[in-house]
Image (cartoon, rainbow, N blue to C red):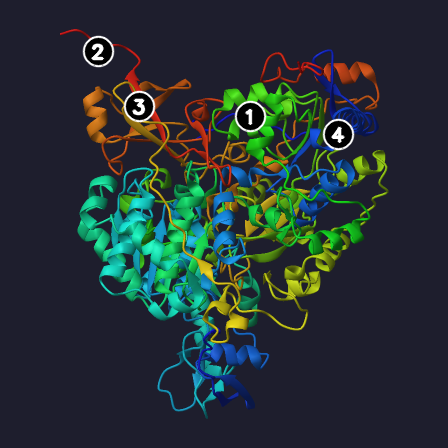
Amino acid sequence: MKKNRAEHYDRLTHPLVREDGVLRRATWEEALDRAAEGFRRNIGRHGPDAFAMLSCARSTNEMNYVAQKFTRVVAGTNNVDSCNRTCHAPSVAGLSAAFGSGGGTSSYQEVEDADVIVLWGSAARDAHPIFFHHVLKGVHKGARMFAVDPRRTGTAQWADRWLGLNVGTDIPLAHAVAREIIHAGLRNTAFIERATTGYEEFAASVEPWTLTAAEQVTGVPAEAIRELAHTYARADRAQLCWTLGITEHHNATDNVRALINLSLLTGHVGRYGSGLSPLRGQNNVQGGGDMGAIPNRLPGFQDILDPVIRARFERAWQVPIQPRYGLNLTEMLEAMAEGEVTTCYLIGENPVQSEADSLSCVKRLSMLDHLVVQDIFLTKTAQMADVVLPAGAAWCESDGTFTNSERRVQRVRQAITPPGEARDDIWILCALARRLGHDWNHDSAEQVWDEVRALSPAHTGMTYQRLADLQGIQWPCPSEDGLEPPFLHGRLWESDPARRGPAAPFAVLRHSPPVDLLDEEYPLRLTTGRTLDSYNTGVQSSGFASPLRQGERVQLSPEDAARLGLAEGEKARISSRRGSVVAPVHIDPGLRPGLVFMTMHFPDEVDTNALTIEATCPIAGTAEFKAAAVRVDRLVPAQAG
Amino acid sequence: MSVPLPPPRRLVELTVDGAPVRVPAGATILDACGGAGQDIPTLCYGDTLTPKNACRVCVVEVEGSRTLVPACSRKAEAGMVVGTSTERARHSRKIVLELLASSADLSATPGAAGWIEEYDARPARFGAQAATVEQPVKVDNDLYVRDYGKCILCYKCVDACGEQWQNTFAIGVAGRGFDATISTEYDAPLTDSACVYCGNCVEVCPTGALSFKSEFDMRAAGTWEESRQTRTTTICSYCGVGCNLTLHVQDNQIVKVTSPHDNPVTHGNLCIKGRFGYQHVQNVRPEPPARPAPEAPQDALASGSDVPRAASGSRSPGSAP
């Protein structure tokens, strides 16, 4: 029963500091002094921008608020980001470019009430199982469901149509859908005229993408593309949902804009039942961004370049805020290599194992003068730190709030006390701030939250009492006296132009195939993802004995396995232009020839990210985890004869 | 543009045990009884499931009705006169409890002991030879246990696994009559079945036939003490969906995870990670006995030597160029 149990991590129970090259146990006093001294030294020597904060998308809104405030007030820089960057930053960037707000526009209940549900690059059945319950409710009520995914996943098995596109051809497919909608006369002309801009240029840009041209590039039969176009455009209520299949690409923000274009073309946004839903991968990645733990926004997703907004925060915090964007995670890592960022405060993140091209990440972190890691485990990243601070697990050892994929802010409550000397994240941040000259004392999470409510209009109406009474509240919630509709951007349908607000622009986009080109040496396309029972780098999910767990495997189509002479369970070498790993083979008939699938759940056994490419989206900084060029070889050369 | 509202619901007035009760149209007699403060026993009724009418323990008498009616599924109608404790209803409930308790082990069914006493049910009167569903407990994985000696065939697990929630269809009813059982395909162990270990069947099981391994083991060891447990509802940390988890904690250890049935995100359902993936927070290496004060440098160095080498192999402070 335990054969597939990976080695689990033990909780960190006391602080550690590095001495003579090794980490040793320390008191909180010593560890905090060392941590603060290193920050002070580096900021004093190189200025505030030598400091970088990686905040934790797993921790509470309250903690993320305090972490970004620490960055902006104590360190004096906007260099704050989170693993948001490795997953849904493009969704936030794309949605805010189109609508001025980075959240998904719909709620789960609307999925149940939709006529058409499109899951694009989303294996929700395995990656978001309870969201998929809502999809299934819709399907049982008669909704048509389309799955757009290179793999025939468990999600695709529930779909009316599976569109198995080639990896990285989302824009051609979306363009062909758009062109078909336009040519069939199914576009929503009234909505386009009133609520959008740039339609003419957009229509011209998709004109070359005939069904035939798209079939050649995407591998999806023209008839299936046509059916998706007609069904989506004719629906009364249509939901367009996506996950990392859209965002983990080098042109991810463009991918997101391509999907948004479809909603603008058909008016499937801003109405009950019609909308756009990026499904977030981490429990509070939405909230981390909302709280300003990103380099370009202040709490409440307010633009840092807006002088009026900045002035309000400067008054509240009594410090000047730099009037420019800070570095994002990808840029931070580059700045470490350049010696521009020399100290990093890393909370609950494991970039050594979660970043694409992991070897180069290790190299960059090792160039820092001072690295402080705050985590619940001694991760591979924490093992590189100068100071390790043991934290509580936010979801069960802290009070606070998380914000989910439907923008619902919900209460997190402490159920157990942290082990040993581990302390709450906010307590640690305040203790460090006090050592750096800021007298911060937050007695309770609610006190932090009330500070957030005072500064973020989207959260003003959410008292802890109301959050408990209503089982969470979706933002925006500007007033304690009422609730807003569960969907965003209803304004786009107003007939009064003043109330309608800024129009949503179509984006003119260009197809850009995956950076890591296939050739004779690396002929297979590797794409990565999650399995049902495991999670990200496996640090958490290795802690329980899942009967489903198989360990890391390289999954191949039956055709490729036969061609390479590989049998189920046999070990094979997988190589890319960056690295090489060995893993057992699993033959999956849901994969098409040429496609290889791996997870990133077992990095201690098989470091999948040694293969992936760090080609990043220039707008959002997300790496192309979904498309690497690899070869797969038998370990033992085939016997002659 | 706004949210479509459901059509307004009329109130219907009926009489429960002589008292007038008003409930929205579409509510059941059970809802009306709840409103009237009557506590009717239920087993196969589930607040997140479509009524199955399998156990008959909730039957009440409705004036003008030839047979007793199950309160959990029968809709309340205007002018209905309902008797929850008439002799006929009480007698029927007593027989149902005797039949269930003589054939299945109701020792882990919340409320059962009280009902048996209240209705003066005597399951033993069928004698020691009475047929039972007694059978060995099925322990074939580390997450949950199936003890079909406690199963009353209420079908709630089948509905939760099937179309009503999980849509995995790993279990169904096999056999007919008294030999009917809940079974995986070909009665295979769970590990060879379609089961995805969401535990949503365990969440709805009314008799403890399905239980979490953690609870099963603690009950076997005699350490399961619900009165000492706290229940705290928080949010799952495994993805962005935001499922609500109720953590059952005993001695600062999470021993069981459920979800509120009225929650708009989960409706009481979870996935394998949310339901079972909590162990990582309580994997703590035991402290060595006779632990010196944390300040003691000897101890500090000793524990430092346990720490694996830095991933880079060469990382040390001041290594920047």
How far is disc 3 from disc 2 in space, using C-alphas? Answer: 16 Å
- Give the camera-side residue of B138 and B95: B138
Residue position marked by numbered label 2 in the rendering: A638
Is the C-beta separation of discs 2 and 1 under 8 Å?
no
Q: Earlier in the sequence, mark 3 or mark 2?
A: 3
Residue position marked by numbered label 1 in the rendering: A352
Where's residue A308, x and y in %?
71, 56
- Between circles 1 and 4, the one closer to the viewer is 4
Amino acid at the residue labelled 3: Gly
Please determine whether, in this image, residue A527 is positioned above or below residue B54: above
**Dot 1, crowdedness within 10 Å: few (<14), some or many (≥20)?**
many
How far is disc 4 from disc 3 in space, using C-alphas? Answer: 54 Å
Where's residue A408, x and y in %?
57, 58
Q: Residue at 25%, 48% (x, y): give it.
A: A209
- Give the camera-side residue of A518 and A558: A518
Amino acid at the residue labelled 4: Gly
Kindly indicate whether the residues beneath marks 3 and 1 are on one polypeptide chain.
yes
The chain carrying label 1 is A
How far is disc 1 from disc 4 in space, using C-alphas? Answer: 26 Å
Looking at the rendered image, the quarter that the N terminus of chain A falls into is: top left
Is the C-beta separation of discs 3 and 2 under 8 Å?
no
Kindly indicate whether the residues beneath marks 2 and 1 are on one polypeptide chain.
yes
Kindly indicate whether the residues beneath marks 4 and 3 are on one polypeptide chain.
yes
Amino acid at the residue labelled 2: Ala
B24 left or right of A455? left
Can residue A406 be seen here?
yes
Circle on res. A569: 3
Q: Earlier in the sequence, mark 1 or mark 4?
A: 4
Is the C-beta separation of discs 3 and 1 under 8 Å?
no
Q: Earlier in the sequence, mark 3 or mark 1?
A: 1
Residue position marked by numbered label 4 in the rendering: A47
Q: Residue at 47%, 52% (x, y): give it.
A: B202
